[in-house]
Image (tube, rainbow, N blue to C red):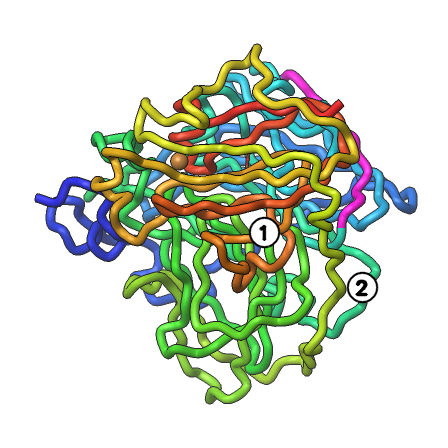
Amino acid sequence: RRRFNMGLAGALLVGGLGIPKGFANEKSEWDTLPTPPLLENESNEKGYVKYTLNVQQGMYEYFTGVKVPSLGYNGNILGPTLKAKKGDIVEIKVKNFLKEETTVHWHGMVVPGEMDGGPHQVVSPNGSEWTARFKVEQQAATLWYHPHGIGTTASQVYGGLGGLFIVEDENRLNLPNEYGVDDIPLVIQDKRFSQKGDLLYLTNMNDIMYGMLGNKVLVNGVIEPKKTIPRGKVRFRILNASNARSYNLKFNNKLPFVIIASDGGLLEKPIKVNDVLLSPGERVEIVADFSEFDEGSEILFGDRGYNFLTLKVGKKGKRYEIPTRLIDIDKISEKDVVRVREFVLSGLGHMVTINGKQFQMNRIDENTKIGTTEIWRVSVRMGMHGMMGGGRNSIIHNFHAHGVLFQVLKRNGRKPTGHEQGWKDTIALRNGDTVDLIMNFRKKGVFMYHCHILEHEDNGMMGQFLVS
Ligand code: C2O
Ligand code: CU
């Protein structure tokens, strides 16, 4: 019996986990991939965006005929897509109708600490409210929002809470931009189901050690969905909203594609690749060109032999020319660095630590001043755990910081490649990896840094820094 952190394909092939029968897609219907609805702006004042998010419980059918309890924002599962422009004042009222506390964190949005929605901005249960108000001051990007309570993040995200937050700006590049048509959001998550189709959570030791891994992959809340796409260039905004799984995403026919954006927005130029690695919390925007395919062709998308999204080429789409230069990214200067801070991630399960410590609500781990430029040197040192899963060429932890976007100076002594050449807020790490992240603090307050494997975060693989 395999015991540790088997790959996704492995998890599916090993007997006993079982693949539930009778899910919606077996009817081979087309277009089972839902597009998360855009939430309506309640304000008609220019430059002002107002939203309400109701955090609620519901029932949801992952498999036809099997209703299971679920969590969602303004619905049964996941949440609507929020949109705002650079320069907008955004006001979001969060109402918590759950029976437990929650928070709503704007992952990737650089806002003052008290608007961040981290563990300090608790929204009490049974109808209590919290209103976040901030100005969007960053470039166009695909961000997201999700719960961030102490010890409850993993179960609330797994239950269904999470949504996209798209920032737009004045940049008028000729990129696919018809939401849900040729600009398609893909929220990727894995979940474990029983033979009967019930949702399972934390059923074995591995779930606690490595974080919860599923036996099915869902996109936008639907297991292995299908979608008709235009015959032309299509942009996908991909979010890995999984609790613990990293994906090496590719098309089954080796179709190359370009990465145009990282966590924090557009890259300087499109990067042609055949696959892209995405750890939990990370986003990437890609553009693939389907114009050479016949109408009706089916192209599969997935990870290591498990294709969980089927695309069917439809009618000819709009014409887009992807420029060879997208934007200019001002490099944060190493000359301005006043300090190098080290963060060492280690352990598994309940033993996860950063710099040997576990999260404490009333302890600030790092202090800095607004306007300061620093290098954060983050590494993973698994010690004796290195043989268990971390010894493989796999993502064992990752690192996310609130309240700031960073640039990757070096990964293991080398210049970053792929989407790590753009603005980032989350970075994937293998055992033994060291990354140098350069950042400049623009917002005051108390912020979190942590592993975005949610069971690790909940087990205390998190610290706090104060920008004053
Ligand atoms: Cu996406 Cu601190 O989280
Ligand atoms: Cu971790």
* Magenta-colored stretch includes residue 96: no
Q: Residues in magenta?
A: 128-138
Question: Dot 1, crowdedness within 10 Å: few (<14), some or many (≥20)?
Answer: many
The disc at residue 408 is 1
The disc at residue 171 is 2
Left or right of 402? Residue 139 is right
Q: In the image, is residue 353 above or below residue 334?
A: above
Q: Which of marks 2 and 1 is in front?
A: 1
Q: Quadrant of residue 131?
A: top right
What amino acid type is highlighted by mark number 1?
Val
Q: In the image, is residue 278 above or below residue 62?
A: below
In front of the other: 371 or 238: 371
Mark 2–mark 1 CB contact (< 8 Å):
no
Q: In terms of secondary structure, where does tag 1 sit?
A: strand
Q: Is residue 91 among the parts visible in the rendering?
A: no
Q: Position of residue 357 (x, y in %)?
A: 44, 20
Location of the C terminus (image quadrant)? top right
